[in-house]
Amino acid sequence: MILNLVGTGIPSDWCKVLEKAIHSDSFSNLHFQLLQESSNGTEIYPASDHVFRAFELVPFHDVKVVILGQDPYHGPGQAIGLSFAVPNKLNKKPPSLRNMFRELVSDLGVDLMPGHSDLTGWAAQGVLLLNTCLTVRAGQPLSHSGAGWEEFTMAVMDSLVKRKAGIVFLLLGAHAQSFKPDLTTSQHRVIEAPHPSPLSAYRGFFGSKIYSRANDALQELGHDPIDWGKISLK
């Protein structure tokens, strides 16, 4: 399948606030690079109809929490357009996601439904599961870093920061935390923790209580808390 960013499903409400980014030279160059790679047979994840899925599931004015990741999973059958999420019933869950669920159980004591891992239940409650890069070459992590996605993601974050309604930004790891200086406005809340990957989970992610902290911040902002135990809509 040739990956074409034109007409792949950025909803109209997001298009309005991202119009400048979508029509930028950076985005055009990104579009050309992805077209060229995919037409040459390079396998790119996720599938083209899932690249902007995070925006399809969470309307702009419904965003309550942003969880910022790095780039999609680079293994076959994993990436579905939502940061950290994989399809339900995938036999082997990525370690970062397993660690996120482990901390969730420890933090809130929830009972997780076996096999649920697509995080659509979070998205339905206003959690924008965003990566700084929205595509990746198969088997090559961060292979589209510097191709133009970071500029697009920064435009997304800027549009959310300018919103009057408060948002909780959950930044996991140094890569996501590099966006922090642009998020420090009085109406929003920023929560930081180490990345849940095996390399850093034991360096402070476990025990970080990110889920209860996020809910406390949401209630402080006048929002209903997230039911984090509701992993999937299916």
Image (cartoon, rainbow, N blue to C red):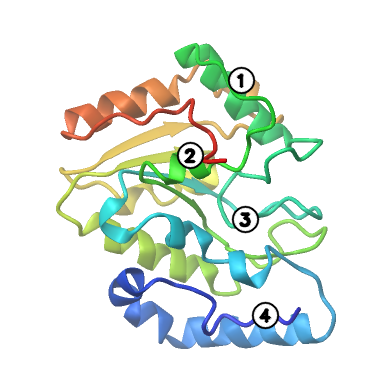
- Disc 3/disc 2 C-alpha distance (Å): 21 Å
To which residue does mark 3 refer? 71
- Disc 3/disc 1 C-alpha distance (Å): 22 Å
- Disc 2/disc 4 C-alpha distance (Å): 30 Å
Q: What element carries label 1?
A: helix
Q: Which of 55 and 189 is in front in this view?
A: 55
**Which of disc 1 and disc 2 is earlier in sequence?**
1
- Disc 3/disc 4 C-alpha distance (Å): 15 Å
Residue 126 left/right relative to 207? left
Question: At which x and y percent is residue 44?
Answer: 74, 69
Q: Is residue 7 visible?
A: yes
**Which of disc 1 and disc 3 is earlier in sequence?**
3
Question: At which x and y percent is residue 156?
Answer: 37, 63
Q: Residues within 10 Å of mark 1 (few under 14, many from 20)?
A: some
To which residue does mark 2 refer? 121
**Residue at position x 20%, y 59% in the image:** 162
**Which of disc 1 and disc 4 is earlier in sequence?**
4
To which residue does mark 1 refer? 102
To which residue does mark 4 refer? 34
- For residue 115, which quarter of the picture? top right
